[in-house]
Image (cartoon, grey):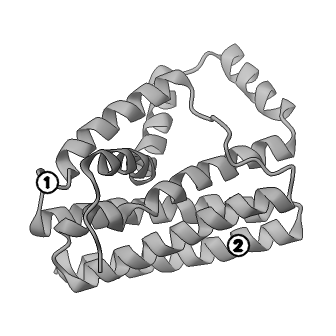
Amino acid sequence: MTHPIAPSRMLFVTTRLLIGLLLMATLNGCAALDRDTGKAPETATHDQSNTQGKSLRDQLNAGYSDLYSNVDGLSQVDKIFYVKLESDDVEKVVTEVTDYCGELAARMEGLTADYPALDIERKIDPPIIKAARDAQKKATLERFAPVVGDSGTAFERGLLIRLLGAMDQQRYMAATLAEREPDPGLSKIMANAADRFAGFYEDIDTLLKARFYR
C-alpha cells in the first residue's frame, strides 16, 4: 500500500524529479540558445579546443553524471504523483519506469566502487543554463503540484508526454555512452539501459496514442 509523503519531503523529492522530467526541454533550449546568439568564429574554435582537451573519461563522466542525475530524479515520479493518477494503465507504465530508474541509479552508485575512474557527480551545467532550468522547474512545479495544478486526463497526458521525452533522451544518452565506453562491462550495462529506455518509450507512445490521441 502506498503511503502519503510529508509535504517537506514531497517538495524536496519533486525538485529532484523535475530535473529529469525537464531534460528534453532543457537540451532543446541549449540548442536554441546556440542558434540564436550565433557564436563568433574564435569562440567556437575556443569551445572546440576545450572539448578536445578533455580526456575521453572526462567526457564520458559528464554523460554518466547527466544520466545518473536524471534517472535518480525520475525514480521518484510515482512517490510524488500517485495521488493524481486515476488510470490503471497510466499508473502501471509510470511505476515500471520509476522502478527501473531507481534500479539503474542504485546500480550506477555501486559501479563507482568497482570502477574508480567512474564519476557520476560531475557538475555540468553553466550558470545561465542552471538559471533557465530553475525557472522552468518552478513553473512546472506549479502546474504539476500534487495538491493543486492539473488533474485527471490533463494531468496524466502531460505527465506521459514529459516521460516520453525523458525516455527518449535517456535512451540516446545511454546508447552514446555504450558506443564510446572502452570498458566492455560498462558498455554492456549502458547498452542494456538504452534498450530498456527504448522499450519504455514505445510503451508510453502506444499508451498516449490509445488513450489521448484517438
Q: Quadrant of the C terminus?
A: bottom left
Drawn side of residue 32 relative to residue 60, left or right: left
Tell me the residue that label 1 is attached to: 147
Drawn side of residue 17 relative to residue 184, left or right: left
**Does the residue at mark 2 contact the one at mark 1 (Cβ under 8 Å)?**
no
From this view, report whether residue 49 is shown above or below residue 62: above
At x 12% / y 69%, what residue is drawn?
Answer: 153
Relative to the observer, which residue lies in front, 128 or 111? 111
At x 46% / y 77%, what residue is drawn?
Answer: 200
Circle 2 packing at 10 Å, graded few (<14), some (14-19), many (20+), is: some
At x 86% / y 30%, what residue is drawn?
Answer: 53
> What kind of residue is marked 1?
Val
Relative to the observer, which residue lies in front, 94 or 44? 94
Choose top left, top right, bottom left or bottom right for residue 113.
bottom right
Q: Position of residue 184 (x, y in %)?
A: 87, 70
Given this view, does label 2 or label 1 mark the residue nearer the observer?
1
From this view, report whether residue 62 is shown above or below residue 178: above
> What kind of residue is marked 2?
Ala
From this view, report whether residue 104 is shown above or below residue 142: below
Choose top left, top right, bottom left or bottom right for residue 49.
top right
At x 11% / y 62%, what residue is drawn?
Answer: 151
Q: Secondary structure at mark 2?
A: helix
Relative to the observer, which residue lies in front, 136 or 35? 136
Q: Position of residue 155 (x, y in %)?
A: 17, 62
Earlier sequence position, callout 2 versus callout 1: 1
Q: Position of residue 164 (x, y in %)?
A: 39, 66
Tell me the residue that label 2 is attached to: 191
Is residue 175 among what the camera can see?
no
From this view, report whether residue 93 is shown above or below residue 111: below
